[in-house]
Image (spheres, rainbow, N blue to C red):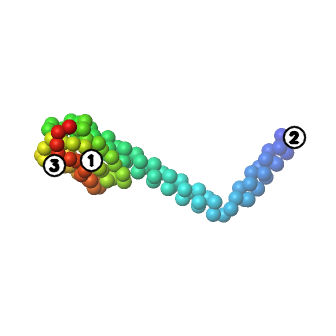
Amino acid sequence: MLKAIVVAISTIGLTGLVAAAPAGASAQVKEKTEQAVKKTGEVITDTAITTEVKTKLLAAKGVPGSKIEVDTTNGAVTLKGVVPTRAARAKAVRITRTSKGVKRVVDQLTIGNS
């Protein structure tokens, strides 16, 4: 009997708590969750793009992939570093541009010895 009363009081208490929540609270929580998921997705996507581009540059013949810094923000990939020739620079930009997820390439590569 005591157990039934505790269960009944608990149920009434929970119902009261749910009813006491502001009407727009669930919409706010939903919106914040969607924003967080979107933001997390961008970070993962940018990381994946950077990894793919860097891997391709390291594997490419004639491109000093280890001397090229790759940074991605919202799908825009920035290449920094020193390459030995114009051909190496063009190839690095082409590899980057054709990589999955790349929206734009910012070429800050310089030609020279390093």
Helix, strand or loop at label 3? It is: helix
Q: Is residue 34 left or right of residue 51?
A: right
Q: Which mark is residue 90?
A: 3
Helix, strand or loop at label 2? It is: helix
Front position in the image: 40 or 83: 83
- The image position of residue 42, as x and y in percent, is 41, 51
Specify whether residue 29 is in view: yes
Front position in the image: 108 or 35: 108
Residue appearing at x 13%, y 47% in the figure: 86
Whether tag 2 and tag 1 are in contact, CB under 8 A, the answer is no
Q: Residues within 10 Å of mark 3 (few under 14, many from 20)?
A: some
Q: Which mark is residue 79?
A: 1
Residue appearing at x 61%, y 58% in the figure: 26
Residue lying farthest to the front in this orientation? 113
29 up-or-down from 2: above or below: below
Task: Please give the residue where the numbered disc 2 appears in the rendered image.
Answer: 2
The mark that comes first in sequence, 2 or 1, is 2
Whether tag 1 and tag 3 are in contact, CB under 8 A, the answer is no
- How far apart, in angstroms, are the residues tagged by discs 3 and 2? 80 Å
40 up-or-down from 67: above or below: below
The mark that comes first in sequence, 3 or 2, is 2
Residue appearing at x 37%, y 44% in the figure: 47
Q: Which mark is residue 36?
A: none
Residue lying farthest to the bottom in this orientation? 23
The number of callouts visible is: 3
Q: Quadrant of the N terminus?
A: top right
